[in-house]
Image (spheres, rainbow, N blue to C red):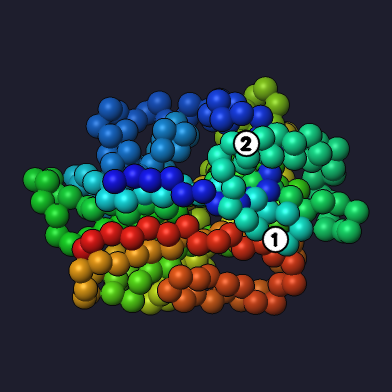
Amino acid sequence: MKKIVIATVLGLLISSQAVTQTFAATGDFLTDNDINRLSSFGFSQEEIQTFTPEEYAVFNEKNGYDTMGHVVEETTTFYKLEDGVTSAVSEQEAIEGAAEIEKSNSIISPMALPTDSVEKKGFIKMTLSVSKVLDSKGAWHGVYTLKNSFHWLANPTYKLTDVTGISINPNLTYIQDSEYGSYKTISAGVSKITDTYPLKANKKDLSGIAFKVDLRTYTKDGSSSIGDHSGYVAFQVKKNSGTSTNAFGHYIHLYNTVNFGIDIKSGSISVSGVTQQDAMDNTAVSWDI
């Protein structure tokens, strides 16, 4: 079953159609079967359109080459970030708010630092999904893939190092070395240069896994500024007790990233040593196991 949960973020956006159009079709190498497999593990059309061969190789390595998924639960949330306060908002409010932010950010230097004279705003979309992992015969052996995606609906004013991840209920066990992730940027302007950066776990705990996301200001070749930021992280779990469970998606936007630590508990990922941050309310899914 899929559901949409509404949450807040600050940002800007032109329209939901415009967001879809920002993605370059770099996933042309994928076969129909490949696309179906990715979709069955909770990947959206927009994510699949920009998949690279390297990403797909990692996906196969972590999930198996002959597996299929079955999405058990999926939740999408929209968050508004504004001057240290996050709140849940509707999709329409996020889209309209993102459009307004884009207008404001267009006159701010991409290397601007947080000051009282600059508004700290943004809107972000998060989707958390849980999928059963099925073998080549369609059988399930108790393994789930958890996936948390993020997409800035408006270009964030400050592009430093953020933190994203997933925390889990104690009755789930993380499967070692199953984690992977990707951060993607698309350039502003007409060319739509797409760059992909693999993400590695920076904090592993029995309660979950967290990844640092180094937000980029320019494309890899330095030719264009960035107009779109998105990404995902994922790992596998299996149950160790109980008949129902839950997992939580997290994203923390930081304004000062000189030194900070990451702590994970079931239901929360937090950072220490940072005075300015916007932490999204948990995006949660619950399901029977």
Decide: is 225 above or below 211.
above
Q: From this viewpoint, is residue 203 visible?
A: no
**Would residue 210 be seen by someone viewing this image from the given angle?**
yes
Say which of 4 and 253 sits in front.
4
Distance, label 2 to label 1, CA atoms, is 18 Å
Q: Position of residue 102 (x, y in %)?
A: 74, 36
In the image, what residue type sits under mark 2? Answer: Ile
Query: Residue 194: x percent and y percent?
Result: 57, 35
Q: Is residue 242 left or right of residue 147?
A: left
Within-10-Å neighbours for mark 1: few <14, some 14–19, many 20+: some
Residue corresponding to mark 2: 95
> Which residue is depicted at the point 10% across and 51% down?
139
Residue tagged 1 = 85
x then y, percent, for residue 118: 86, 52
Secondary element type, mark 2: helix
Amino acid type of the residue that numbered disc 1 sits on in the rendered structure: Val
